[in-house]
Image: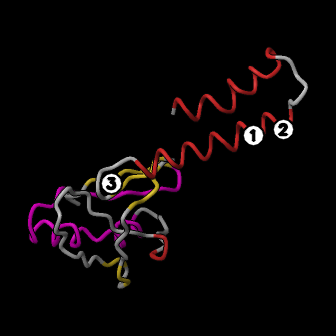
Amino acid sequence: MESTIRLFADNCVIYRKIINNADMEKLQKDRLGEWAVENAMKINPSKTNAIHFTRARVKDPQNYSLMSSLIPEASSCKYLRIILSSELIWVDQVNYAVEKVWKSLHFTMRILKKGNSNTKSVPYMSLVRPILEY
């Protein structure tokens, strides 16, 4: 297999630099489905997306398939809690992080309405701040 594969827990990513149609064909010929069977992995084609990272204004359509199923193209994908955008912008990731922080912060505030600042700082440091730092 010429393409790069990254595995983490139940996530799998296969990628390669695509410059021309020959590179697209090489990626398709790597046969991820067969590789998965050989390595006793199950890949669900319905949970699979193709994403094309570029700043080009005109994007050529991609027609990748996995186990005879056409892989739909997505404008963004979530990988290891990070939202990757095909346009190489971070708006979705920032919005996702802000939403998670607000939920954690409101949860903490609801639970500790009458606590003092020392009591409130421990849940803040353990629940809210790690999201911001990640």
Say which amino acid is labelled 1: His
Is residue 44 placed above or below 124 in the rendered structure?
below
The boundaries of the magenta stretch are: 9-38
In the image: residue 125, left or right of residue 88: right
Residue 31 point in image, percent of width and height:
28, 71
Q: Nearer the viewer, residue 26 or 54?
A: 54
Q: Residue at x 26, y 57 (%)?
A: 53
Disc 1, SS: helix
Disc 2, SS: helix
Q: Residue at x 42, y 57 (%)?
A: 12
Can you name the residue that lies furthest to the right here?
114
Image quadrant of residue 126? top right
Graded by Cα atoms within 10 Å as few (under 14), some (14 to 19) or many (20 or more), the crowding at tag 1 reads: few
Is residue 74 placed above or below 66 in the rendered structure?
above
Q: Which residue is mark 2?
A: 110
Q: Residue at x 36, y 65 (%)?
A: 75
Of labels 1 and 3, the one closer to you: 1
Disc number for residue 106: 1
In the image: residue 15, left or right of residue 46: left
